[in-house]
Amino acid sequence: MNGEVPASVQGIYDEVLRRNRGETEFLQAVQEVLESLAVVLDRHSEYTEMKTIQRICEPERQVIFRVPWQDDRGEVHINRGFRVEFNSALGPYKGGLRFHPSVNLGIVKFLGFEQVFKNALTGMPIGGGKGGSDFDPKGRSDAEIMRFCQSFMTELYRHLGEYTDVPAGDIGVGAREIGYLFGQYKRITNRYESGVITGKGLGWGGALVRTEATGYGAAFFAEAMMEAAGESFDGKRVTVSGSGNVAVYGVEKVHQLGGTAVACSDSSGYVVDEKGIDLEVLKQVKEVERGRVADYADRVASASFVPDGSIWDVPCDVAMPSATQNELDGDAAEVLARNGCRYVVEGANMPATPDAVRVFRRAGIAFAPGKAANAGGVATSALEMQQNASRDRWTFEHTEARLEEIMRDIHARCSATAAEYGSPGDLVLGANVAGFLEVAEAVHAHGLV
Ligand code: NAP
């Protein structure tokens, strides 16, 4: 990837740009995929003829709706809800809901577009979609969160179904919100349709390992990359940005695999703990008290809190950006390279900017894009759907073994595809091409729909 769209797909990009102006993140994600696809068109003229790429770049359906709700003082608020049903060639639309003030159509489309390829890479029968709202859950009471979720679902339910569209959580949407959303869906439809949403509580259709899946999966993916280079996590220093669902369980698995996670963050700053992040304290602060990372530093003597600056200034062997999109730019990538970082594994969706990816490439840093490395979450969601469909419940060990197998398989497919298409070791190209081929074949088979 050199930051330029190859001539054979330039026309496609220009058209996407013309129709989606101002949707910065979506355009960035499309450009990154198109940069990889010229080599595919050289071998598959049918995709040019049938405009397969253009069709995959256009969502099948986009829903935008009003979400009115009342806070605890009786004040009325109006938020905007989104669901982008991007592609259903491989199965029902599948992808999370994000509640964050930054959410807009361009962000939801970028996430939905990435999700299409990610879901294809898992090898599971799921299409791609994404949704959310510009609602800010920070500082809201449980009752306010419930009222918002109920209002959101009162509109969204008509677009969902276990064979149609199956949401899950994402930033700002965890087990509590999934509970309220599922409850309202059940109430409106009068159906106990477990497979309509994933990330459910264990007592009512949820799957073991779903909570841990994305972070664990990213660590398994990192381990597979290291093994390919004859290395392991043993003795490696790791920085993990964020301290949400992906980051916490990324840290947990890194430790289990022999590495030491020495830093994590949230939007208020980062903490460094040279002894290794104490997971018990981190989980208490983040999952129980819903506090800030500074509270961690207050309780752990070996830790310090840095309110300004960048977590990427902390020297490490492995960086796992696991907070949000475009959080690691070119300058931060230069610092990582100078400090001897050797692996960057995206736990979040598109956390590294195109400039950062160029720096990694130049510096010989092995880089795993999110659509491959963080696919463990959605893969385990698909395992949850499998268990719901068969009215079964699997053990933690069995589910984790399936997750590890899926992550290793994704790594192997991306590596093999990169080599087959003339760029050995390029996991960005490998993921884009392998994901695209899987979707394109099904799109082609279904005719012009
Ligand atoms: P989460 O539990 O809500 O945690 C997000 C973390 O990132 C929090 O620590 C948050 O800090 C931080 N963060 C969010 N926006 C930020 C911003 N603009 N600047 C700085 N920090 C920010 O979310 P998550 O589920 O871990 O998701 C993290 C990333 O992984 C997202 O890109 C998501 O799309 C991706 N992902 C998640 C899953 C999954 O299964 N959860 C699966 C695949 C991909 P504050 O609390 O201070 O905001």
Image (cartoon, rainbow, N blue to C red):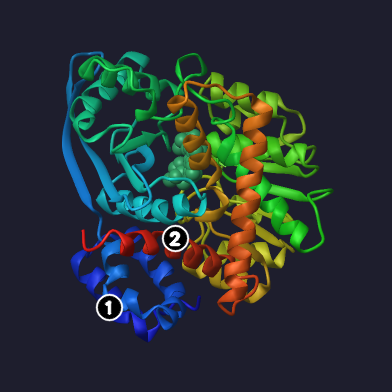
Residue under the image location 45 percent in, 53 percent down: 120
Q: Which mark is residue 362?
A: none
Q: Looking at the image, which is closer to me, 55 or 320?
A: 55
Residue 155 lies left or right of residue 40; in this view the side is left
Q: In the displayed structure, does residue 4 sit left or right of residue 187?
A: right
Image quarter in which the C terminus is found: bottom left
Is the residue indicated by label 2 positioned so its CB lies within 8 Å of ligand 1? no
Check disc 1: other Cα within 10 Å, few if <14, some if 14-19, many if 20+.
few
Q: Which residue is mark 1?
A: 49
User: Which residue is depicted at the point 71% across and 48% down?
Assistant: 238
- The relative height of residue 108 versus residue 326 in the rendered view (above or below) is above
Residue 353 visible: yes
Between residues 327 and 441, which one lies in front from this camera angle? 441
Residue in view at x 51 percent, y 34 percent: 383
The residue under the point 18% across, 14% down is 74
Identify the residue under disc 2: 438
In the rendered image, residue 406, in percent from the top left (x then y), is placed at 60, 46
Q: Tell me the element at label 1.
A: helix
Q: Amino acid at mark 2?
A: Glu
Residue type of the residue flagged with mark 1: Glu
What is the spatial separation of the Cα atoms under label 2 and label 1, in whole angstroms? 18 Å
Are the residues flagged by discs 2 and 1 in contact, CB closer than 8 Å? no
Residue 172: x and y, percent?
41, 33
